[in-house]
Image (tube, rainbow, N blue to C red):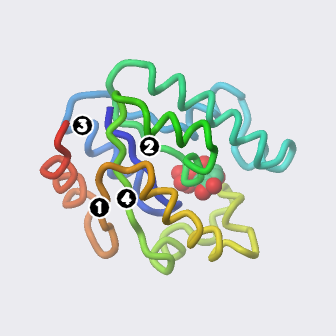
Amino acid sequence: MIVLAGFMGAGKTTVGRLLADKLGVPFLDSDQVIEERSGRAIRDIFAADGEAAFRELEHQAIAGLLAGPPAVLALGGGAAGHPGTRDLLISSSAADVVYLRVGYEEALARVGGDTGRPMLARDDIARVYAARQEMYAAVAALTVDTDGRAPEDIASDILTRMPAA
Ligand code: S3P
C-alpha cells in the first residue's frame, strides 16, 4: 500500500488518484472515510468536538485502512501527529509511506482560504508547518518535492523511486 503524507496542499489527493490509476488499485482518502463514517464534515467535527477528537477518528480510520487490501492511501496533513498513527505508519510492513513535500508559500497558494480546512484558520499555521517537517520525514521511506511540478510528473517519479511499487 502506498501511503501519501504531507502538508495540506501537497497534492496528496491529486497525485494519489493518478498513482492508483497507474497501479490499478483503489484510491482511498482518510478524510473522506472519516466524513462518510461519521456523516459529518471535517470542519464540523473540529468545530463541535475539537482537534483531539478528530485525531482519534483519524487514527481509527487509518488503522482500519492499513489492515485492508492494497490501495493508494492519502492521509490528512496532520495524521502523523498522533503518536499511535505515527507508530503504525513506521511499523506497518504493508505501508510504503511517501512524503510529498511542499513549500509553505506554495501550500498556502494552493489551499489558503479553504474554509473546509480548519487548520488553515489558525494564527500559528506557519509554526505548525515548520513543526511537522520532522514528523513527515520520520514516517516516510521516500521524500518527493512537489513545488512547481505537475502531478503526473510527481506520480511517475514516485513509481520510479519507490522500491516496493
Ligand atoms: C489537516 C489536514 C486536512 C484534514 C484536516 C486536518 C491538518 O487534510 O485532515 O482538515 O491537520 O493538516 P488535507 O491535508 O488533505 O487537507
**Quadrant the N terminus occupies:** top left
Picture quadrant where residue 25 is located: top left
Mark 4 Cα within 10 Å, few/some/many (few <14, many 20+)?
many
* Residue 165 visible in the displayed image: no
- The reply, left or right, for residue 138 in relation to residue 150 is right
Q: Are marks 3 and 4 in contact (CB under 8 Å)?
A: no
**Disc 3 or 1, which lies upstream in sequence?**
3
**Quadrant the C terminus occupies:** top left
Picture quadrant where residue 137 is located: bottom left
- The residue to which callout 2 is attached is 74
What amino acid is found at the position of numbered circle 2 in the picture?
A: Ala
Whether the residue under disc 3 has CB within 8 Å of ligand 1: no
Q: Is residue 72 above or below residue 77?
A: above
Q: Are marks 2 and 1 in contact (CB under 8 Å)?
A: no
Mark 3 Cα within 10 Å, few/some/many (few <14, many 20+)?
few
Q: Are marks 1 and 4 in contact (CB under 8 Å)?
A: yes
Q: Which mark is residue 48?
A: none
Mark 2 Cα within 10 Å, few/some/many (few <14, many 20+)?
many
**Disc 2 or 4, which lies upstream in sequence?**
2
Q: Are marks 3 and 1 in contact (CB under 8 Å)?
A: no
Mark 1 Cα within 10 Å, few/some/many (few <14, many 20+)?
some
Q: Rounded to the nearest whole Å, what is the CA distance between mark 2 and mark 3?
A: 14 Å
Report the front residue among 55 and 119.
Answer: 55
- The reply, left or right, for residue 141 in relation to residue 116 is left
What amino acid is found at the position of numbered circle 3 in the picture?
A: Asp
**Disc 3 or 4, which lies upstream in sequence?**
3
Whether the residue under disc 2 has CB within 8 Å of ligand 1: yes
Mark 2 vs mark 3, foreground winner is 2
Q: Which mark is residue 21?
A: 3
Q: Rounded to the nearest whole Å, what is the CA distance between mark 2 and mark 4?
A: 10 Å
